[in-house]
Image (cartoon, rainbow, N blue to C red):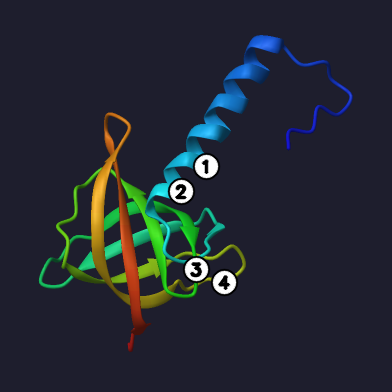
C-alpha cells in the first residue's frame, strides 16, 4: 500500500507506481516455489575458479534461496560463495549457493536465482 502522508500525490506518478508494483508482483508469482521476503542488501558473487567477484544487490530471500540483481549473466549450475553485506556488521555473511536460473531484468541487468547449499567456511 502506498502511504501518501501529508504530501498530495501526482496522479500520473501514483499510477506509474501502482503499475510498477503490479509488474513486480506478477514477476514474483512466475518464479516462486517458496515464499520470499523483499530484502535489499549489497551482494558479491564469488564464482568458483574466478578471482574477481560480481557486484549486485539482493532482491528477495527465503530460507531456501535468494534472488540477486547484477549486470552479469550467470549460467545455471554455477556454484559460488555469496557475500551478503549487512548493515551493522563489518564482515559479510558468506553462503555457498548454486545458480538455478538467470534471466534478463530490464535492458542491462540480470536476475539470478540462487539455491542455498550451506554456510561458507573461511
Write the residue at 19% across / 55% down.
74
Judge whether 99 appears above or below 111 on screen.
below
Spatial CA distance of label 1 from label 3 is 16 Å
Q: Which residue is mark 3?
A: 62
Does label 2 or label 3 sit earlier along the sequence?
2
Does label 1 or label 3 sit earlier along the sequence?
1
**Depth check, front residue: 66 or 49:** 66
Q: Which residue is mark 2?
A: 28
Write the residue at 64% across / 10% down.
12
In this image, 93 relative to 1: left or right?
Answer: left
User: The residue tagged with tag 3: helix, strand or loop?
Assistant: loop
Image depth: mark 1 or mark 3 in front: 1
Spatial CA distance of label 1 from label 2 is 5 Å
Does label 4 or label 1 sit earlier along the sequence?
1
**Depth check, front residue: 11 or 87:** 11
**Label placed on residue 79:** none
Does label 4 or label 3 sit earlier along the sequence?
3
Judge whether 89 appears above or below 2 on screen.
below
Q: Which residue is mark 4?
A: 89
Q: Are marks 1 and 2 in contact (CB under 8 Å)?
A: yes
Q: Which residue is mark 1?
A: 25
- Quarter of the image with the C terminus in it: bottom left
Q: Are marks 2 and 3 in contact (CB under 8 Å)?
A: no
Spatial CA distance of label 2 from label 3 is 13 Å
Spatial CA distance of label 4 from label 3 is 21 Å
Spatial CA distance of label 4 from label 1 is 31 Å
- Disc 2 crowd rating (10 Å Cα; few below 14, some 14-19, many 20+) is some
Does label 2 or label 4 sit earlier along the sequence?
2
Image x and y of residue 54, in percent: 26, 55
Amino acid at each position: 500500500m502506498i502511504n501518501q502522508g501529508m504530501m498530495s500525490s501526482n496522479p500520473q506518478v501514483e499510477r506509474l507506481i501502482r503499475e510498477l508494483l503490479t509488474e513486480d508482483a506478477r514477476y514474483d508469482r512466475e518464479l516462486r516455489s517458496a515464499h520470499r521476503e523483499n530484502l535489499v542488501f549489497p551482494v558479491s558473487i564469488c564464482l568458483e575458479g574466478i578471482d574477481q567477484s560480481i557486484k549486485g544487490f539482493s532482491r528477495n530471500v527465503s530460507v531456501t534461496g535468494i534472488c540477486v540483481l547484477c549486470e552479469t549473466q550467470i549460467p545455471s549450475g554455477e556454484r559460488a560463495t555469496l557475500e551478503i553485506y549487512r548493515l551493522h556488521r563489518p564482515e559479510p555473511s558468506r553462503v555457498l549457493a548454486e545458480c538455478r536460473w538467470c534471466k534478463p531484468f530490464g535492458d542491462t541487468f540480470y536476475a539470478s536465482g540462487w539455491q542455498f547449499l550451506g554456510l561458507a567456511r573461511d
